[in-house]
Amino acid sequence: GENVEQHPSTLSVQEGDSAVIKCTYSDSASNYFPWYKQELGKRPQLIIDIRSNVGEKKDQRIAVTLNKTAKHFSLHITETQPEDSAVYFCAAWDSSYKLIFGSGTRLLVRP
Amino acid sequence: SAVISQKPSRDICQRGTSLTIQCQVDSQVTMMFWYRQQPGQSLTLIATANQGSEATYESGFVIDKFPISRPNLTFSTLTVSNMSPEDSSIYLCSVGSEQGETQYFGPGTRLLVL
């Protein structure tokens, strides 16, 4: 089955800097890769996603890139703000029709 | 996206008892899922709730422990049976797109078993 690895587990950046979170997946048939943001005590919120026929997708300050050959995808947050502080999860929709989640990255944006 | 609610939002239960968690959606959806999120951990799929048929359980989760109902396209329940402290977690339902991949989560049920 699919295995999704996520790095780093924690990330601390200065406000205004960029943050990058990386994930790798094992199932070459996986074709959909969402990213979720979970604030403390809240539900995971879908913030951006990418399908395997696209290499990059942007939405304001966030972007996701996908390298199908290397089987990895990344979340990029530019001009970080304190409200970006949260736990971020990557996921992959695998060939058995399940979302497999990474282990999460705790992002802290220092004011 | 659909509005998803869960009841209860939190509960404290005694070991050996059972708790049924409800998930209600404001529109008809084909795909509904139940996840567990242990403290400080990621999300683990428990089962896919299929309307009109038995749920499909993931490895490590069994129907006797986590019975699921899906009576219609807007509602599902998850029961945590014969609870132990190890069942203390957040339980989340999610609804998916037609194929299921784009998922939105309910607010979760925070369960503490003493």
Image: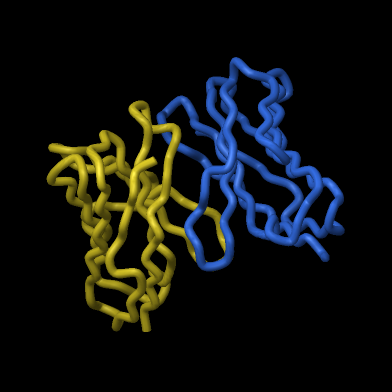
Chain colours: A blue, B yellow
**Residue at (26%, 60%) from the top-left corner?**
B65
Q: Nearer the viewer, residue A85 or B86?
A: A85
Q: Position of residue B25 (x, y in %)?
A: 27, 48
**Residue at (68%, 35%) from the top-left corner?**
A24
Q: Nearer the viewer, residue B64 or A19?
A: A19
Question: Where, by quadrant of the figure, is residue A75 drawn?
Answer: top right
**Residue at (18%, 46%) from the top-left corner?**
B70
Q: Residue furthest front?
A: A60
Q: Position of residue B48 (x, y in %)?
A: 31, 42
Quadrant, the N terminus of chain B = top left
Question: Where, by quadrant of the figure, is residue B17 drawn?
Answer: bottom left
Q: Is residue A58 left or right of residue A38?
A: right
Q: Position of residue B78 (x, y in %)?
A: 25, 57
**Please, is residue A30 above or below residue B80 in the view?**
above
Quadrant, the C terminus of chain B = bottom left
**Residue at (65%, 59%) from the top-left corner?**
A86
Q: Position of residue B10 (x, y in %)?
A: 36, 73
Q: Is residue B24 left or right of residue B46?
A: left
Across the whole image, how many numbered discs are drawn on residues? 0
Q: Residue furthest top?
A: A53
